[in-house]
Amino acid sequence: MEIVMGNVDLYWEIPYVSENAKLLYARAIASPENAWVPYYNFKALPIHEDWGLDSWWNNLYKVHPFRAGIVKLDPNVYYDWHIDTDRGVGVNLLLNPCKSYCLFNKDFKRGKSLDQGNVTGSFVELQYKPNTYYLVNTQVAHTVYNFDTTRYLLTVDFEEYKDKLTYNQLLKESLEARWWEK
């Protein structure tokens, strides 16, 4: 599979097609409400070891331990512009087709008033492909706008915080180790 670099400073498409996205989506929609826990203003469903993550995740976990979960965003809800407080990097897989936008803004500035922050600005969209993993730079301002249906996204929280594991570091390691091929 070809490695595409595109907007590599913001996100990188991992050249691997998920074999288990549909299974994870089925588990998410079948899970009772009390299985979901609060996670940074989302509702999250922790992933259990026996849930069948794609095989390459074991290779990544050996080098950089993590917790995985499915986050859901209800219809007609957005998650405001932000930079992650703890995570330097994420790995994401959109589990269901939905009208939603994940946007990045390299020049975002939040101010106390509109004249001190961004009112307008340029952005780059991460257009999720079905069954495709992405390495995401969570230290660049980003937002999600979700529209007509609940959005389910598999994501990881590495045990190493942003000062120990950066996006650029994991991108370099990924290109060298090619965990998805083993």
Image: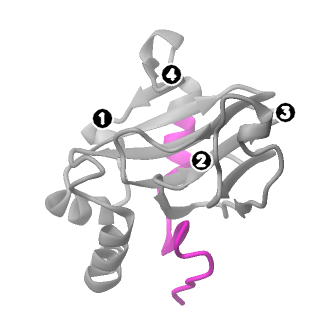
Residue at mark 4 to residue at mark 1: CA–CA distance: 13 Å
Q: Which disc, if any, is residue 31?
A: 4
Q: Residue at x 32, y 68 (%)?
A: 170
Question: On the rendered structure, is 76 left or right of 42?
Answer: right
Q: Secondary structure at mark 3?
A: loop
Magenta stretch containing residue 35, yes or no? Answer: no
Q: Give the residue pinned by disc 1.
A: 48
- Residue 57 x, y percent position in the rendering: 30, 59
Label 2 or label 3, whichever comes before in sequence order:
2
The colour scheme used here is one colour
Reading the image, the residue beneath label 3 is 148
**x and y percentages locating residue 45 in the rendered image:** 44, 27
Q: CA distance from mark 1 to mark 3?
A: 29 Å
Determine contact: label 2, label 3, CB under 8 Å.
Answer: no
The residue indicated by pointer 2 is 95
Amino acid beneath label 2? Leu
Q: Nearer the viewer, mark 4 or mark 3?
A: 3
| Mark 1, other Cα within 10 Å: few <14 / some 14–19 / many ≥20 | few
Q: Earlier in the sequence, mark 4 or mark 1?
A: 4
Is the C-beta separation of discs 1 and 3 under 8 Å? no
Nearer-the-camera pick, 110 or 123: 110
Residue positioned 20% across, 57% down in the render: 64
Q: What kind of residue is marked 3?
A: Asp
Q: Which badge, 4 or 3, is on the more N-terminal residue?
A: 4
Quarter occupied by residue 79 = top right
